[in-house]
Image (spheres, rainbow, N blue to C red):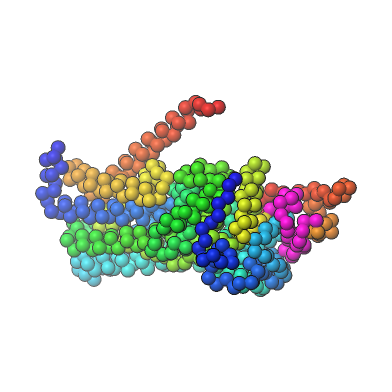
Amino acid sequence: MKVKSFPQTSPAGVTPRHHPGHIPGEPILRVQHLNLTYEGGVALQDVTFELTSGERMAVVGPNGAGKSTLFKIIAGLLKPDSGMVSVFGAAPSGHICISYLPQHSHVDWNFPVTVSDVVMMGRTRKIGFLRLPSASDREFVSLALRTVGLNELSQRQISQLSGGQQQRMFIARALAQEADLMLLDEPVTGLDTPSQEELFTVLESLKKEKVTVMFALHDLKLAARRFDRVMLLNHRLVGIGKPVEVFTREHLSKAYGEHIQVLENGHGLSMVDDTCCGEEKE
Amino acid sequence: MIDWLLTPLQYSFMVRGMLAAIVVGVVCAVLGTYVVLRGMAFFGDALAHAVLPGVAVGYLVGGGARGPVFWWAMATALLSAFGIGAVSRSARLKEDTSIGIIFAGMFALGVALISMVRNYSADLTHFLFGDVLGVSNTDLVLTAAFGVLILLVVLAFYKEFMVISFDPTLAATLRLPIRWLDYLLIALIAMSIVVSLQTVGVTLMVAMLITPAAAASLLTRRLSRMMLIAALVAVFSGITGLYLSYYLNLASGSAIVLTCTAIFAFTWVITNLARRKSRARPSVNL
């Protein structure tokens, strides 16, 4: 897949995407002592971590471990009981550089819009109130579509896309939004292997754009294979770091309890889990 | 044929009625597109019925003059719209339950108020089923002014309304003022209902909102085109309905709505047949 560079919105500067309100030198994401309790119990407890620009982090953990909750807080859609989230040094609610792809998009696939219309929606704020998309907005959209390999389907109505194409359309929308931080909540759940591969190829190509990605998934093997850093979450942060350091017998049984069996097979650990692919209820 | 078309237009009330039906058709069809896409048909129906007490008070206060009826109806429509919005947001009831309670209560209040007047059944009929042939010049000016205002606002916030209707999560992450935009859209629906009251009346109002938009939704996959087709269907129905009303001596509001419904039914049958045909066709590239 060929990757084009995005036009720079700011004068040749430090980052290809510049948003006002970003404090230079701050990590793209800093989460400190995050706590949230639902009626049903603790969702997140004392979660603290940082992400640097351009990083891609896999977030794994059992069903109901608080992955979606964490994403919603970072996206500014949920307020924590206590703790702090800062994106480039400021609260998430002030940013439009965060894109969030929920686990289940409650989107009406029969809505009368084309793929290109949906991607253009990512630019709504950039275009501004009372304005029409300019030539440069259209250029952003067509670049984003080319990056995810959907340029030939741009005029299709969205119900005519496959599952993998739908996910790539949302990633194109995040690109058109000029998102610096993409929160993808189980985007590969329900995708066949070729579609998963296509999605990861697209994400690889975003490294160059310094887009930071948090990616929730169930498949630990995939997480270990595809990501430099992983986060193991079960309400608390069980482990964070390189896959080999995080996916240890101790951590895994702490995170999954009886739902996982960790087998030592001479080459490392292999895991048998029964939590895969279920619907996460929160 | 030309005579057949021109004869009714000799009467100025027919011309005024037709102009009103055209404006109302366009306004309702455009907003109705959002009503259909957002699943707000019941809300629209309820809002139309809830306007009745306002109409009644305006009628009683103004002694039958049209101006007070319009402004009282407008105030009631906006209040009910925000009231329904607030109640369904806060109460521990399902949204359709809250809407149902407010709608039936307001409608009953309206009927009760009108029944206080001596010759109420004739007036009530006009409010319930419309009286497009009774449109005055003042009515026409008010209708047109509000119609243009409503369409301009829809145009101004076209892309924002599209985002909040299609994907509220995206709207939230883009920090769009979702609540403000929701209330604005509801206010526009309320205004379009009042503007259309005289054409089809409160009970048939919902048809003007949803039927043309529903027919259009079967024919296109683009929002802007859906609005355009819905508007064309509504204008055609308005004009055809009035001719039918003139020649067949039908109630004008019903004639307009029945034309709309017939167009919808026709579209539905045609699109379903077309789909079945394309499915039955053997696939060439196996």
Foreground residue, B1 or A109?
Answer: A109
> How many numbered callouts?
0
* Relative horizontal placement of residue A261, taking residue B247 as reference (left or right): right
Q: What is the quadrant of residue A243 in the picture?
A: bottom right
| Residue A275, horizontal then vertical, whole percent | 73, 50
Residue A226 is inside the magenta segment: yes
Q: Quadrant of the N terminus of chain A?
A: top right
* Relative horizontal placement of residue B12, taking residue A211 as reference (left or right): left
| Residue A161, horizontal then vertical, whole percent | 53, 43
Residue depicted at x 67% and y 42%: A193
Q: What is the quadrant of residue B45 in the picture?
A: bottom left
Foreground residue, B86 or A45?
Answer: A45
Residue depicted at x 23% and y 47%: B239
Q: Quadrant of the C terminus of chain A?
A: bottom right
Residue B201 is inside the magenta segment: no
Q: Residue B176: in sight, yes or no?
A: yes
Residue range highlighted in magenta = A217-244
Q: Residue B170: in sight, yes or no?
A: no
Foreground residue, B179 or A245?
Answer: A245
Residue depicted at x 28% and y 43%: B259
| Residue B285, horizontal then vertical, whole percent | 53, 28
* Relative horizontal placement of residue A89, taking residue A41 as reference (left or right): left
Residue depicted at x 54% and y 60%: A178
Residue sitting at the far front: A12
